[in-house]
Image (spheres, rainbow, N blue to C red):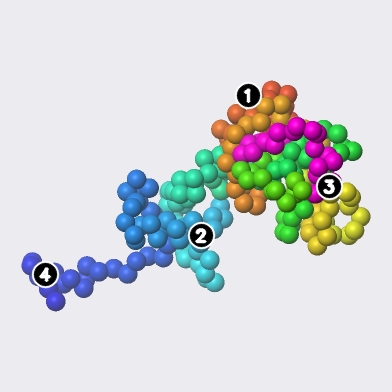
Amino acid sequence: MKREGGTSMASNLRAPAPIGQRVLPHPAAAGSPVEDQLYARLRMEATPTGEYFRTRTPAGPPPLTPEQQRRNYELLATVSRRPHTAPDHDRTPIRALTIRPPYSDLIAFADDQVAKRIENRVWATSWRGTLLIHAGSSINTQALAQPQVQAALPAGHQLVVSAIVAIADLVDIHADDGACAPWSMAGHFHWRLERVQRLTVPVPALGAQRLWRPAPKLLRKITAANPHLSGRLARAEAA
């Protein structure tokens, strides 16, 4: 079948490229059902690796050009709506972990006899280093009902939500061995935290799942509001 001018319509049809190979339109141009699906797939399926931008398929698509990688990283950050999370190609050695209150508050306490120095997770990581403790936006009401938590929280304590509340060193992760006390949970990996310092002024931020890289702007806000942490963060950045 031909259009006017003798060009075949079939010759103008192209199969859509795999999502990992597309340079997506600017988010302002999105809005059609097809574009909405594309952004949803990008958010759920795409895995930035620093070298390639692959979908979760056995083989994966060929690598993108550096410009295409950069563009897709920017779009992924925009779609995810996490302005305080650095793009994957930002190699800051500092990480952040989102923890639901009251556990984030308990970690931030200065008194090691009361504070929570073990974080329980069902997953582990080989990463070790300077870790920002981020209080999530929702409160763990089941935790608030636990006698241990009630005893540790001072009377009238106001939980902090949606903010960076402390800085710590993640020094070890080990499987449940029954020896960690008193905050360990059976059947979890135990993340051991040391050198915990509470932020005098919590810094509002959106979090993310698993370990995430704090954006440079967020780190600047932390040091501006908490000058006593500037040296520690600078040394961690330089490591």
Q: Which stretch did the figure color magenta?
A: 146-168
Residue denoted by label 1: 224
Q: Are marks 2 and 3 in contact (CB under 8 Å)?
A: no
Dot 4 or dot 2, earlier in sequence: 4
Rendering coords of residue 93 (x, y %): 67, 42
Q: Of label 4 and label 3, which has the lower sequence position?
A: 4
Q: Which is more foreground, mark 4 or mark 2?
A: 2
Please check the rendered image and state whether residue 83 is part of the magenta-colored stretch, yes or no: no
Task: Say whether disc 1 or disc 2 marks the residue closer to the N-terminus.
Answer: 2
Q: Nearer the viewer, mark 4 or mark 3?
A: 3
For residue 147, the mark is 3
Residue 30 in the figure: left or right of residue 195: left
Instruction: Give the residue number, with chain letter if any, for mark 4.
Output: 3
Amino acid under label 3? Pro
Tag 1 and tag 2, C-beta contact below 8 Å: no
For the residues marked 4 and 1, what is the alpha-carbon distance in whole angstroms?
64 Å
Q: Is residue 238 at all visible to an observer of this figure? A: no
Q: Residue furthest bottom?
A: 1
* 26 relative position to 57: left or right: left
Residue where numbered disc 2 is placed: 44
> Is-magenta flag for residue 151?
yes
Mark 1 nearby-residue class (10 Å; few <14, some 14–19, many ≥20): some
Residue located farthest toward the left when viewing the structure as drawn: 4
